[in-house]
Image (spheres, helix red, strand yellow):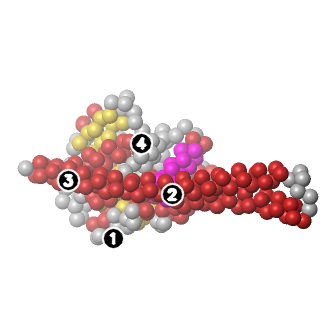
């Protein structure tokens, strides 16, 4: 962490004041003490390890309460170059973006295996399609966001915030941009996941859950259509045998058709109910945004007073 802190810029054109906030996610290696010795402005220490997503969400809330207009997130493992932060915040300062994600250009990182590079590429392409954003490095944690974007962001995942927040940003119609960044040599292996299978499972479930939360009608209607077609085929087969052949011995087709068509009907009902729940979720998010905005304005007054 000291390397990461020393690499952070002291001045950025267009920024009046730079403050550093560290989230100590229940670590046992003296992170908070190291941060204090290195002159960190704000330290949040969680009593237990709550995971990357929770730490990010808590840090975001704290930044808003401290009056931040632009928030930059980076990792403590010195993966990203702090000198690239001005490049990261520039589109926000120019009013061109709400969220900016650093593109590590993962295909050129030497310590990434061939498998990891391909998975990063395919995963980012999937997130591009689902979120309708043009971010080539979806799992990059080096990103900046405006105050307004931070106020509206809600992280529900227990694993990581990177994929979830991108899909959210796309669905909320935020202006999301990407800028190329540099990376440092690897100092330690990632502690986010034990192996590649765990990463794929967690990332896949996060993508599916987040997309389903925002587009439940599409998902359940697509499933309903598949079951409807699946039920139609044996049903048509039974009708053909009934009128043009011997219907005996084909009753199984009729039973299978009925089961699949009933499932299809139930999925349509679930789709409608899920869409209504999604509408209610939007109202709750709007309420949360208003509460956060009021809290941040009050904090601004307290800090200035």
Q: Nearer the viewer, residue 227 or 146?
A: 227
**C-alpha separation, residue under disc 3 versus residue under disc 1:** 25 Å
**C-alpha separation, residue under disc 1 versus residue under disc 2:** 37 Å
Instruction: State the mark number for residue 294.
Output: 3
Mark 3 nearby-residue class (10 Å; few <14, some 14–19, many ≥20): few
Residue at the image point whose x is 39% and y is 66% from the top: 173
Q: Nearer the viewer, mark 2 or mark 3?
A: 2
Which of the marked residues, 4 or 2, is nearer the chain's N terminus?
Answer: 4
**C-alpha separation, residue under disc 4 versus residue under disc 2:** 34 Å
Q: Nearer the viewer, residue 247 or 21?
A: 247
Which of the marked residues, 3 or 1, is nearer the chain's N terminus?
Answer: 1
The x and y percentages for residue 223 are: 62, 57
- Kindly state the secondary structure of the residue where label 3 is placed: helix
Q: Nearer the viewer, mark 4 or mark 2?
A: 2
Residue at the image point whose x is 43% and y is 63% from the top: 170
Q: Which residue is mark 1?
A: 96
Mark 2 nearby-residue class (10 Å; few <14, some 14–19, many ≥20): some
**C-alpha separation, residue under disc 1 versus residue under disc 4:** 28 Å
Q: Quadrant of the N terminus?
A: top left
Mark 1 nearby-residue class (10 Å; few <14, some 14–19, many ≥20): few
- Magenta-colored segment: predominant secondary structure: helix
The x and y percentages for residue 42 are: 23, 42
Residue at the image point whose x is 39% and y is 33% from the top: 49
Instruction: State the mark number for residue 52.
Output: 4
- Kindly state the secondary structure of the residue where label 2 is placed: helix
Which of the marked residues, 1 or 4, is nearer the chain's N terminus?
Answer: 4
Q: Which residues are magenta?
A: 200-216
**C-alpha separation, residue under disc 4 versus residue under disc 3:** 27 Å
- Kindly state the secondary structure of the residue where label 4 is placed: helix
Whether residue 35 is situated above or below residue 166 in the rendered picture: above
Instruction: State the mark number for residue 272.
Output: 2
Residue 274 part of the magenta segment: no
């Amino acid at each position: 962490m000291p390397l990461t802190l020393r690499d952070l810029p002291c001045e950025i054109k267009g920024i009046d004041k730079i403050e550093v906030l560290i989230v100590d996610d229940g670590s046992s290696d003296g992170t908070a003490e190291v941060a204090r010795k290195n002159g960190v402005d704000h330290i949040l220490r969680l009593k237990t390890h709550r995971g990357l997503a929770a730490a990010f969400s808590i840090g975001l809330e704290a930044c808003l309460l401290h009056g931040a207009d632009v928030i930059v997130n980076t990792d403590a493992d010195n993966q990203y170059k702090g000198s690239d932060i001005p490049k990261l915040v520039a589109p926000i300062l120019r009013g061109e973006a709400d969220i900016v994600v650093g593109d590590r250009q993962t295909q050129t990182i030497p310590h990434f295996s061939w498998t990891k590079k391909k998975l990063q590429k395919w995963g980012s392409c999937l997130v591009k399609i689902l979120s309708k954003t043009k971010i080539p490095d979806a799992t990059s944690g080096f990103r900046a966001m405006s105050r307004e974007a931070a106020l509206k962001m809600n992280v529900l995942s227990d694993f990581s915030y990177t994929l979830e927040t991108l899909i959210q940003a796309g669905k909320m119609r935020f202006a999301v941009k990407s800028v190329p960044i540099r990376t440092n040599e690897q100092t330690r292996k990632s502690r986010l996941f034990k192996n590649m299978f765990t990463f794929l499972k967690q990332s896949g479930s996060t993508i599916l859950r987040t997309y389903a939360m925002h587009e439940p009608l599409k998902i359940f209607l697509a499933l309903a259509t598949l079951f409807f077609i699946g039920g139609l085929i044996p049903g048509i087969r039974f009708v053909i045998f009934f009128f043009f052949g011997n219907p005996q011995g084909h009753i199984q087709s009729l039973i299978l058709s009925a089961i699949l068509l009933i499932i299809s009907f139930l999925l349509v009902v679930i789709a409608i109910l899920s869409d209504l729940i999604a509408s209610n979720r939007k109202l709750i998010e709007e309420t949360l945004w208003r509460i956060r905005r009021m809290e941040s304005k009050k904090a601004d007054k307290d800090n200035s007073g």
